[in-house]
Image: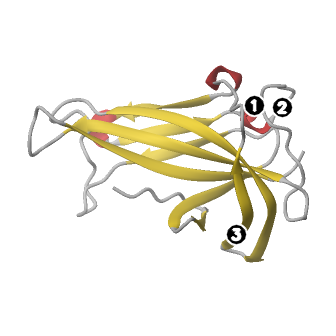
Amino acid sequence: MSLLLNGAKTMTIAGTEMQCLEIYTGEAYTLPLNFTYANGSPANALVPNAWALSTSAKFYTVDNVTYPSPDEVVLGNLTLNSGQPNANAYTLQTGFTNAAAGTGYLYIGNNITNTANANIPQITLANSAANSTLVIVTLEITKQSTANSSLAEINKEPLGFIVRYQ
């Protein structure tokens, strides 16, 4: 399963290609999710048993971020922040709006960018030598295996969010 976001850039971290959206401090996003089969028809997330969606985030410091072209992001020296924020310090939500039609959402709250929250890393200006924060949000989809109903298939899709301005 692959996840494609409208208007996203692609970035490669340690050989792993992922979608990348830029979030400005104080902004919130609701990203629509449309699950489809290879032939393009909507996936029924109720069959054989209801799918489950969950999300999590990890915060990294990037020593510099540059944009050599409109659809390319170059990150320098990624470091996982020690002391990750508690998940209650920021808002991430996901769910289905119509599971039978394979439609859902991923909500990224404005507090993921440190809007007056001391538990979130301080954001500095990107596209400069100053440190930036990269938030990798992971969307996890769990569903019953079609090959063996006693097994669960788990798919984790990483999304990179570059937080650009203070």
Within 10 Å of disc 3 (Cα), the crowding (few <14, some 14-19, many 20+) is: some
Cα distance in 3D space between marks 1 and 2: 5 Å
In contact (CB < 8 Å): disc 1 and disc 2:
yes
Residue drawn at x 72%, y 37% as measured from the top left: 82
| SS category of the residue bearing label 3 | strand
Within 10 Å of disc 2 (Cα), the crowding (few <14, some 14-19, many 20+) is: some
Q: Which mark is residue 155?
A: none
Using residue 143 as the reference point, say whether residue 55 is left or right of it. Answer: right
Q: Amino acid at mark 2?
A: Thr
Q: Identify the residue under disc 1.
A: 111
Q: Identify the residue under disc 3.
A: 73
Q: Give the farthest residue toward the top.
A: 88
Q: Which is more N-terminal, label 3 or label 2?
A: 3
| SS category of the residue bearing label 2 | loop
Using residue 9 as the reference point, say whether residue 101 is left or right of it. Answer: left
Q: Nearer the viewer, residue 161 or 101?
A: 161
Q: Amino acid at mark 1?
A: Asn
Question: In the picture, residue 64 is in which quadrant?
Answer: bottom right
Using residue 120 as the reference point, say whether residue 4 is left or right of it. Answer: left
Q: Identify the residue under disc 2.
A: 115
Q: Quadrant of the C terminus?
A: top right
